Image (cartoon, rainbow, N blue to C red):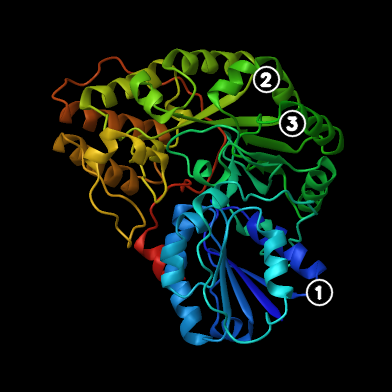
Amino acid sequence: MRALLVSTYDLGRQPFGLASPAAWLRRAGIETECVDASRDRITDDQLRRASAIGFYLPMHTATRLAGGLIARARRINPDATLLAYGLYAPLNADWLRERGVTHVVGPEAEGELVELLTRPGAHGARPKAQSPRPKAQREHAVPRLAFIQPDRSMLPPLGRYAKLRMPDGSTRVVGSTEATRGCKHLCRHCPIVPVYNGQFRAIPLDVVMADVRAQVQGGAEHISFGDPDFFNGPTHATRLLEQFAAEFPGTSFDATIKIEHLLKHADLLPLLQRTGCLFVTSAVESIDDHVLAQLQKGHTRADFVRAVGLCRSAGLTLSPTFVPFTPWTTLEGFVELLDVLDELDLAEQVAPIQLVIRLLITAGSPLLELPDIQAAIGTFDAASLTWPWRHSDPRVDALQDAAMRLVGARNEAPRGEVFDAVATLARTAAGMPPREGRAHTPRRAPHMDEAWYCCAEPAADDIKFI
C-alpha cells in the first residue's frame, strides 16, 4: 500500500492536515508521500504510484481547488482509492462522490484513514462508494483520538510558506500547529458548527510542544496557533503558554480568540503579551448588533470596542476580521463600519481583504435556517459549492464587487491607503461627502504576507497552477 496525501491550500501554512495523518499512516507501516499543491506541482508519476490518494479539505477554497485534481487523479490512476478528509469533506460529500471519491471522512480523520487503508481488501481494486451515514450519526461521529506528534519530514521547508512581516519591514519564518480542534461555540456562519456541533478536543501538551520544537529546529521564529479559538480551553492554553515561553524565549506567536473570550478571560491578556504574542485574530464580523445576533456571534458592538481597549492596555495587537457584506448590510452601515474602524485607529490592523468579504453560504450552513437568507439565495451552485445570494438593494452588491476589485488591484499598497480608497468608494456609493480631517495613527501591525483568508474564493491562476 502506498498512500499519497494532497493539500491544495491551507492559508499559506505548512499543512498540519498532511503532517498529522502522515504520522499515523507511517506508524501503521503504510508508505506515505505528501504533496502540498500550493507549493509544488503534483506529477503524473506521483498519482500513478499511489494505491490510495487522500485530499485534505480544511476549507472552502481547498475544496474547490481539489476538484480538478480529483478528476486528474481518477483519469491517470483509475484503480486508486480516492479519499477526502477534513472539515469541508462531509459538508460536500455528495459532490465529492459524484467525482469518484470513494471514502469521505471528516476532521479527526487520522484513525479512520489508518483503518480504511489497512483493512482487508484495501490493497485491491477500487471499492464502491460509501453509503451516506444518517444525519444524526454524522453530527455526533467526531471521534476522540490519542494524538501523536505530526510528521513534517516530507513537507516543503517552512521558509517556502507565508512569512510574518514586522512593522519595521523585517520578516520571520512561521510555523503553525494546533493546541485544540473543533469549537464549543455555535456561530451560524461557521463551517465548524455543522461538523463538530459544539464539540472541541484538547491536544496533549507534550504533543503540541513536540510539534513546536520540531518546527523551531526547522527554522521557525514565530508560531501560529491555528485553533478555531485558543481560549476554548483557557487552562490548557495557560499551561501551554507557560511551557512555550520557558522553552522558546524569543519565539513569538499569534492566536485566534473570540471577542467573547477576550472579555471573559481578560486576566489572561497580560500572559499572552508576556509569553510572546504579537497579535490576536478575532472574528468580529460586524459592528451591527442585529447582524451579530443573526450570526450568533456571542458579542455586541460595545463588546468589540471594549476588547480593543483591553488588548491595547495589555500591549497586544488585535487583528479583527469581518464579513461586511451580508443580506443585512446597508450602504450607510458599511460606511459606519469604516468610520468606527478609523475612530478606533484600526485601519492598519485590518487586512484590506477583510473590508470586502461577502458572506459565504455553503452546503449544510446553519444560515439556511434564517428566513432572510432563504429570501436572498438562489439555487445551489455546484461549481462554486455555495448558495449564491443577491442583496435586495443592488447598490450593495455593486459596491462589494467594486471594492473587491479595488483591493485586488492594490494588493501591495499600504493598508492605510487602501482603507482610505475603500472609504471614498463607499461614501460615493452612499451619496455621502468625503470624511474630512482623516488621519491614521501609525499603528503598523505585524501580519502574514499572504493575503488569503479561510473563506476566500480561489483565483483563476491558482486553479490553473494545480
Quarter of the picture containing the N terminus is: bottom right
The residue mark sitting in front, 1 or 2, is 1
**Where residue 369 appears, x then y in whole percent?**
35, 37
- What residue appears at the point 68 percent right and 30 percent down from the top-left corner? 277
Residue 60 seen in render: yes
Check disc 2 and report the residue beneath it: 269
The tag earlier along the polypeptide, 3 or 1, is: 1
Q: Are marks 3 and 2 in contact (CB under 8 Å)?
A: no
The tag earlier along the polypeptide, 1 or 2, is: 1
Q: Are marks 3 and 1 in contact (CB under 8 Å)?
A: no
Secondary element type, mark 2: helix
The residue mark sitting in front, 3 or 1, is 1
Rounded to the nearest angstrom, the CA distance separating label 1 from label 2 is 44 Å
**Where residue 102 appears, x then y in whole percent?**
53, 73
Residue 357 seen in render: no
Check disc 3 and report the residue beneath it: 237
Secondary element type, mark 1: loop
**Where residue 66 appears, x then y in whole percent?**
47, 66
Residue type beneath disc 1:
Gly
- What residue appears at the point 48 percent right and 58 percent down from the top-left corner? 62
Q: Nearer the viewer, residue 264 or 362?
A: 362
The tag earlier along the polypeptide, 3 or 2, is: 3
Relative to 417, 169 lies left or right: right
Relative to 55, 114 lies left or right: right
Q: Are marks 1 and 2 in contact (CB under 8 Å)?
A: no
The vertical placement of 138 against 356, above or below, is below
**Where residue 236 appears, x then y in whole percent?**
77, 31
Q: Residues within 10 Å of mark 2 (few under 14, many from 20)?
A: many
Q: Residues within 10 Å of mark 1 (few under 14, many from 20)?
A: few
Rounded to the nearest angstrom, the CA distance separating label 3 from label 1 is 33 Å
Check disc 1 and report the residue beneath it: 29
Residue type beneath disc 2:
Leu
